[in-house]
Amino acid sequence: MSLIKQVGNNLIKIKKYSIIVYIFAGIILVPVGIILIALFIPGSEIWNHILNYLLPSYLLQTIMLAMGVLVCTSVVGVLSAWIIVQYNFPLKNIFRILLILPMAIPAYISAFTYAGILDYTGPVQVFFRNTLGLNEGYPVINIMNLPGAIFIMTMALYPYIYLPAQSAFRQQAGSIHDASLVLGVSGTKLFFKVSLPLIRPALVGGGILVLMEVLNEYGAVHYFGVNTLTVGIFRAWFSLGDLPSAMKLSALLLLGVLTIIISERKIRGRIGYSLPTARPFFPKKASGWKSFLFIFLCSIPVFLGLLIPLAQLIQWAVNADQDLLSHKFINLIKNSFALTGIATLIIITAAITSAHILRNPSIRWRKSLLSILTLGYAIPGTVIAIGIMIGFGFVDRQLNFILGLITAGSGRLFLSGSLAALIIAYGVRFMGVALNPIDAGFTQISTNYHKAARTLGRNSISALFIVDLPNIHSSLKAAGILVLLDILKELPLTMILRPFNFDTLAVRAYEMAIDERLPMAALPSLVIILIGLISVLLLTTGIKKRRI
Amino acid sequence: MSILEISNISLTYPAMDSPAVNNISLNIEKNEIHALVGESGCGKSTTIRMIAGLENPTSGEIKYNGQLLNRAGYSVPPEKRNIGMVFQDNSLFPHLTVKENILFGIKDKTQRTEEKSEYFLNLTGLNGLGERYPHEISGGQVQRVALSRALAPEPELILMDEPFNNLDIRIKMNMLEEVGKILNKTNTTCLLITHEKSEAFILADRITVMREGTLLQTAKPPELYKSPVDTYVAEFFGRANHIPVKLNNGMFETAMGMINVPSAFEKNTLSELGFLVHRPWDVKISKDGDFEIEIVNSYFFGDYQEVRFKPINSESDVQFKFFTHIGEYFAPGTKLRVSIPAERLTFCSS
């Protein structure tokens, strides 16, 4: 007893390493701070122009897109989750997984894929012309607009609603349904009065993720010509050449995100949802015609979100006659995977270090530190990229100044445009993605294991590796997969910060698409999707195992 | 008059070999509190879930106020039965306030009034808690809300599925008394399910014992305690001595000697082998007692002392027990004469 207590006090010695966590938090806060400062710098003439003529439309388009996607993903996600949990029908277990997979296709990829499918040379119009012999006057679906963007993003993002809704529906005790039935409330009334309100916390959580993804999205909206705030930031900088304006727009976007995060905490508010678990919930067997209906309904998002774009990409890749083993393509893959791998490794190491240090309950501002470290995922990549770029630009100027005093040379860039800057930016944005599962893993295992190992003669580091990490290996796996996938498909941040002439798969795919060389975009896209599909499958089977 | 008539109902769950409920029949009288007791897994929960309409019996009939609820291939859905139910885990809707929970089952919107909720909050001693959420009140209060919610649509019959399980023992005593009063005041018939004999004893007018899907005995509590149908029922409701007996020339042959068959027994109903069952407090020590016994050991239980004994000069391990008040001491090996009043004995064939 006294031994354990003593070691417990030793564990607190980690406190002296807590400086590391404060540094990480600082790295995340600096770009955020830089952007917020921009609110107070005087605007240029260009800013006045943006403010008067462009901003209202940016805001309107952003809000319309966000609301549209939120509503559509909620309907698709909740409905498919309800069908899957409530009923048994043929192929249900396959659909349960298939319905998750569309999240493996980034919105910017399905955006240009659908544009290709529906344009003049695409299979739909070719079918109308060649097979049906119609020359003019056949219906042309124009997808390059706001409704199109809502459609594309809904198909990419509804799994963010489907997944939490599904597990929330499943957790609803059977007895809550029984209670409702006995009190005379059944059918759709039961759904709207009991089942749906009960999954509200899950919906709010999923909805927030969807909103963050919408605000972060650059590729799909830019491609479709929808002028959201994120597109506006790019334009202010690259087309109008006014960095301060880009910063000001970023600051507005950041304020919007912070408002959403704060109001989410408020919404969760009073209603507690520790549900009774006495009687699990059993799905009903669907009757014949209902089975067909459910299979049909579940097929819609699977086809639109996964199979159709995938088929088109494969067709392009096969016909494009690209040399798979060409020097250029191999280089691209090497670049992309090396960058992704190194960044993932660094981020996971940082996350493990932070989470382990934060296990000590006596660390000051523990909760705030956790919130700061996970803040980055809510902040759009564009905003982080601009913050980091300005920060490093400042450091470079100071270094140059000092260097100029010593030698005559100047004008060198040390950090700006380096891989280090890119990796740090990834760290700012994806630290939370790694930290959340790792922190959850640590909370699940008692610190007594660690303490016991220490009484048996291991030091802190060795106890961490021998006892703690093996016990949270599934959390580590999840964290690694999530970060890897996020970095691999990341677009706006990489486009801004990548070193000159350094391409990743995502950037190459998007640039080819912008150049209207869609078939050339197919191969890198397929690599991203393949990694995505594998990741999602690994994660879902992993989760399933843990449930048992 | 019976409010609920259950006739020969059975239920076999898919993928199970034996039925969960096997051909049971039971009548619940109007305004009684009837307890259905048994160990977990005996089928009692399944039984009330069938009465509520949450499960359908494979065969048999259920009638409520003379109206058919279940027959093979026919079933009135739970929401149409107007039978109240209090669930084991209380199942309050966590997203609704106490008041909204209570008014949930009242179909007529004009009846969902402030007065109505006030009445039930009052009735169950929840004054001032109407606006709280279920997680903001205590376990005992949650149970009261669950009861109010079930009573609010004014059902004539209310089913309670182990409602007191999660309550602390002191709160439970108060709740049992109060629930009895409330049911009485609202003229509600109640079928209570429990595995706790004390709950059944305190609350119930009649008790039915269930085991492995079948009903063993229905009786008033004292009768059940005094005259159990078999050793299982005897043991379920308290400690008992089961003296193995053999019928021999109109007398019982026991390890302690021969006993006359008490005159109250109907001789033609007795089987050749069986047990004479009685409670440990029934054993009287007296110099001219019928049996000579030897003390084996005694155990201190606080309120009383349990004394183990065996027939004198017996080689077998068979032991019996009697209870004494604290302060009387019996050393192991002490020899005594005891008797058991004939009216305290019950014959059980199994």
Image (spheres, coloured by chain):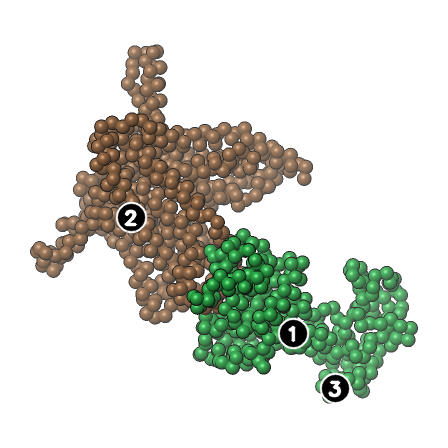
Chain colours: A brown, B green
Q: Is residue B246 among the parts visible in the rendering?
A: yes
Is the residue marked by circle 2 packed among few (<14), some (14-19), or many (20+) residues within 10 Å?
many
Where is mark 3, residue-wise? B266
Residue positioned 49% across, 38% down in the render: A367
Quarter of the view holding residue A132? bottom left
> For the residue labelled by badge 2, is the local secondary structure a helix, a strand or a loop?
helix
Image quadrant in which you'd find residue A448: top right
Q: Which of A247 and B320 is in front in this view?
A: A247
Callout 1 and callout 3 share a chain:
yes
The reply, left or right, for residue B134 in relation to residue A68 is right
Residue occupying the point 45% across, 38% down: A371
Q: Position of residue B238 (x, y in %)?
A: 72, 69
State the CA–CA distance, disc 2 to disc 1.
Answer: 64 Å
Tag 1: residue type? Asp
Please name the residue that numbered disc 2 is placed on.
Answer: A153
User: Which residue is painted at 55% across and 78% down in the image?
Assistant: B4
Can see residue B14? no
The residue singled out by tag 1 in the image is B205
**Residue A216: x, y in percent?**
32, 40
Specify the subunit that label 2 lies on. A
